[in-house]
Amino acid sequence: MSAAAIFAGDRVAGARADGPFIAGAFLLVGGVALATAAAGAALVVVALCLVGGALVLATAWRADRRALWAGIVASQIAVPLLVARVASEAGHVSPSTWLALVGCWLVAILAVSRLSALPLLSPALQRLRDIVVVALFGAWVLLWWQTLVVGFAVPLILLPAPSVIWSKIVASYPVLFADFRQTFLKAVLAGYAFGSILGFLAAIAADRVPFLRRGMLPVANLVSALPIIGVAPIMVMWFGFDWTSKAAVVTVMTFFPMLVSTLAGLSASDAMERDLMRTYAAGYWQSMFKLRLPAALPFIFTALKINTTLALIGAIVAEFFGTPIVGMGFRISIEVGRMHLDAVWAEIAVAALAGSAFYGIVAIVERAATFWHPSFRQIVN
């Protein structure tokens, strides 16, 4: 049986539930080990681990939802105290601390699996549940990153802890914002808009004129296969060192996905629908706007979502080949040379957050524009 099935499965009548048993046992043993540790531990941490472990373990035989969630809350309250204990024992963390932390983590997995299986009828509650699950999952990823780096005293040059990266972001906010403005607000957005619009218009032209379709696709395929490290220096020579050359690189990278996806979307409507439009004496543009473009919207938004990440990657890599003394790619290349890895990770974190937010905005617009599509109706139902 897989780990996911163990933690998500319901109890068979009269049998023991494996998920609460494993998580509760780990947490209870961790609490006992902390209580008997030679160096001693704070009574609050020990009490939270023992109470949380006992409550979760008890629900392995007796289904008691309130006891289960009380145990989950107690274990998660103990987590910050355990993280502080790891920081105080940096480099020589006791096994009892690791055991208690693993117990809390297993209880968190149990909480996520139970939350995901909750039957909620309200769409608002479903969205809130999804946000809580994602937040809990992401928080534990960061927590393990922090505790493993601090607990094993990993050198900064290999991997800084999230707390170090956050401190660098706060301390270097003006520099990071200037880089963000130069790379994202100027190069990425301009190149993304130009590339997507040109790809869309080229697809419409290729659909209207058959010989363009046969001639344009091989050329577009050839352009998309060009290596960015070869294109970027050429664009710098053509458009200068400022953000315009990076926007040109982004335009080249985002043009082809939009062209191919739009052409595929325009062919998505079936023959019966097109025949129906002909029986209504609809012209090419009437069929285009009333049938084919609405049917192509899911394909177009797929290309727009793919282009959000391509645009950011293209702009950052292009800055390695010549730029003013500002920009995410410029900062990363300079700080790597100076061995300031915390600054490099700060730039990476800002780029990741910007890319995720950009993708999320496009996904929200897609949901609003294609709410009628069967895939979204199936999710809601």
Image (cartoon, rainbow, N blue to C red):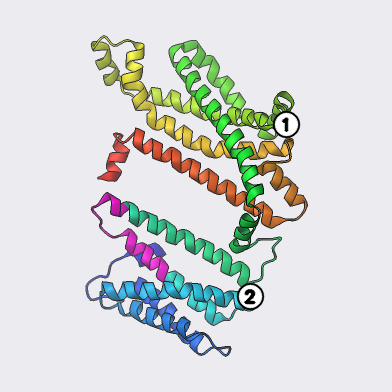
Residue 301's disc is none
Crowd class of label 1 (few under 14; some 14 to 19; many from 20; radius 10 Å):
some
Q: Secondary structure at mark 2?
A: loop
Q: Main secondary structure of the magenta part?
A: helix
Residue indicated by mark 2: 90
- Mark whose residue sits in front, 1 or 2: 1
At mark 1, the secondary structure is loop
Q: Is residue 103 visible?
A: no
Residue ID at (75%, 47%): 334
Q: Is residue 216 magenta?
A: no
- In the figure, 244 relative to 17: above or below? above
The residue positioned 55% from the left and 75% from the top of the image is 84
> Between 73 and 62, which is closer to the camera in this rendering?
73
Q: Residues within 10 Å of mark 2 (few under 14, many from 20)?
A: some
Residue 123 lies in magenta, yes or no?
A: yes
Residue 200, x across and y down, in percent:
48, 23
Viewer can see residue 277:
yes
Instruction: Residue under label 1, please give it.
Output: 241
Part of the protein shown in magenta: 107-126
Q: Position of residue 97 (x, y in %)?
A: 53, 79
